[in-house]
Amino acid sequence: MPACITSHTGCPANMLRLKRSAEILLRRLDIAGSELSILLVDDAEIAELNRRWFNRARPTNVISFGQHYGLPGDAGSQIVQADIPVSRRVVPAVLGDIVISVETARREAVQADTTLDHRLTALMIHGLAHLMGEDHELGPDEAIGMARVEMNLAEFLYKEEIMADLCINVDHIATIRQARGTDEPDPVIAAGIVELAGADGIVVHLREDRRHIQDRDVELLRQTIKTRMTLEMAATDEMIRIASRIKPDIVTLVPEKRRELTTEGGLDVVNLEAGLTDAVSRLHGAGIPVSLFVDPEESQIEASAGTGTDCIEIHTGRYADAATPDEEDREFEHIVNAARLADGLGLRVHAGHGLNYRNTSRIAAVSEICEFSIGHAVIAHSAIVGLDRAVKEMLSLVKKGTPE
Ligand code: PXP
């Protein structure tokens, strides 16, 4: 993983946010293949590092330890050298370590009237600038240069949305309603509660057989959703006509088989590229952005880029259904590789299917994924704890989870 974060001080901050921020900046700096380690410590531990490496027996806020930039004769890990010209840098497999004292960061946050998360991000950026060869201690010009680099990185980061969005699929509220053929529970009311709980969007799948969501739901949801509406559907003429009239904020094209319990597998974009290209272009013609639901496979992602789609949603079902930890690790790697490939091809990356309260935080740490679509686990949990709490618990995994 490009950014790995460890805390020796418990988990005082939003580590997931810091990890995603670091990875976004590594991509910005074109060194996404390089590994960066971030270690959160207390004052005593950073004071000891400060004494050992800099002969200064006091705590500080951040220290960077860089791997050299591959210059001849360099060996091992040492304090980063600021005077290596950018043109001579060869980005190493391991960029280095940034050690941050959370105790000092917290004091500085109070003094600056800001949050601990903001202060930690600023210190991470400072450490990263050092690892890239900047050094404010060399003189006033270098200090100005380094401050400029930090400002640019911070500005870039705050323009990006750092945490992934969570969109809740409310199909199974409609499944309960359809089980009795009555008019409750109403997915339209459920969508309102989901939005008030803080979710970033609502997803519904209008199936050809109308087994849960009905045309009436889609019409009313379009009028009432305040966040954004994702319409999942098959790439059929009927569905493209409905979407073009309703105008959801985005359409996710999925494969649909009549007898399946839920969507099984991603689209076979490799073999259906011409038809999907046509569907994407018709939806674009109606002003609707499109996402393709695909398995985490290189050939499918590459074919997806060829259709003109805006986005892919990675099918996380095989990861979610993994029978052993080894299998889960392998499926996780496929998802990470697929997300990186799609991001590199300029596609927005979403993910979903089978995600639950146990397996979501690991995926939420993949910084290329900017949106999750989760349904069954949240609706099932809501039957026990209520919809508001079920959504809030999932939001906290997606936005505040602890990376491995
Ligand atoms: N994404 C897509 C494309 C889906 O078809 C579904 C299931 O409707 C989901 C996400 C959500 O899956 P789950 O209900 O297992 O969370």
Image (cartoon, rainbow, N blue to C red):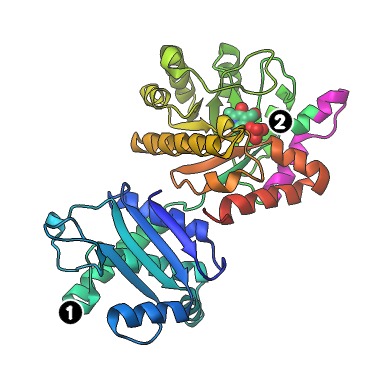
- Helix, strand or loop under label 1: loop
Cβ at disc 1 under 8 Å from ligand 1: no
Q: Amino acid at mark 1?
A: Gly
- In this figure, which residue is indicated by the disc labeled 2? 171
Quarter occupied by residue 142: bottom left
Q: Is residue 264 above or below residue 153?
A: above
Q: Amino acid at mark 2?
A: Asp
Span shown in magenta: 176-197
- In this figure, which residue is indicated by the disc labeled 1? 139
| x and y, in percent, of residue 157 in the image | 39, 57
Q: Is residue 155 above or below residue 387?
A: below
Residue depicted at 58% across the width and 30% down the height: 317
Quarter occupied by residue 219: top right
Between 1 and 372, the one lying in front of the other is 1
Q: Is residue 105 above or below residue 78?
A: below
Point out the quarter of the image occupied by ligand 1: top right
Mark with earlier residue (2, 1): 1
Quarter occupied by residue 77: bottom left
| x and y, in percent, of residue 41 in the image | 47, 72
Residue 209 visible from this viewpoint: yes
Horizontal arrangement in the rendering, residue 86 relative to residue 95 (left or right): left
Cβ at disc 2 under 8 Å from ligand 1: yes
Secondary structure mainly formed by the magenta segment: helix
- Please tell me whether residue 184 belongs to the stretch shown in magenta: yes
